[in-house]
Image (cartoon, rainbow, N blue to C red):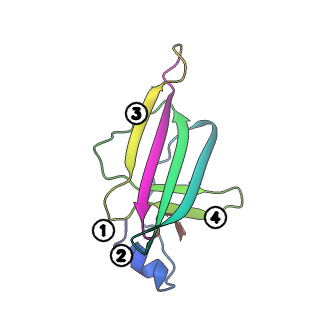
Amino acid sequence: MPPFILQNHLAGVPVGILGSPFPVVFFSDASCESEQSSDNGVIVEKTTLRFSTSESIAQNCPWAFIVTDVNGRSYVIGQREESAPVLSNNNTVSDDSNIQQVKVSFSARKSLIPCFL
């Protein structure tokens, strides 16, 4: 993850993600929602990503997630300088499978940043 992606984005500098992202296989539809609110006069954006997967995702790692919309535009959730996104795994969706519902939450001044790979 390159440093200072928030500052680069706010300054109009395109954000490139270097390296090879690790793809996560997900089942059914994933959702990504972002909303803004005011906290003591400061605009804060909260992004929530939800998906079902059979892969084990460690919760104690400082993850960043790259999502791609139906139009092919990519966005990064997470920043090197901010606190890491919060992951929570719900109970398995099915007793016959190892599929779990994963929720990723991240709040920052800008939490869903356009990027290119």
Residue 20 lies, in percent from the top left, at 44, 57
Residue type at mark 1 is: Glu
Viewer-side label of 3, 2: 2
Q: Secondary structure at mark 1?
A: loop
Residue 88 lies, in percent from the top left, at 40, 38
Mark 3 and mark 2 lie on one chain; the one further toward the N terminus is: 2
- Label annotation for residue 56: 3
Tell how many labels.
Answer: 4
| Disc 4/disc 3 C-alpha distance (Å) | 26 Å
Mark 4 and mark 3 lie on one chain; the one further toward the N terminus is: 3
Vertical side of 103 occupied by 39: above or below: below
Which residue is label 4 attached to? 73
Which residue is label 1 attached to? 81
Q: Which residues are magenta?
A: 97-109
| Disc 4/disc 1 C-alpha distance (Å) | 23 Å
Residue under the image location 42 percent in, 56 percent down: 106
Residue type at mark 4 is: Arg
Which residue is label 2 attached to? 4
Spot the residue most to the top: 96
Residue under the image location 43 percent in, 70 percent down: 109
Quadrant, the N terminus: bottom left
Is residue 64 inside the magenta stretch? no
Residue under the image location 54 percent in, 34 percent down: 52
The picture quadrant where one finds residue 79 is: bottom left
Vertical side of 36 occupied by 93: above or below: above
Mark 1 and mark 3 lie on one chain; the one further toward the N terminus is: 3
Q: Tell me the chief SS of the magenta region.
A: strand
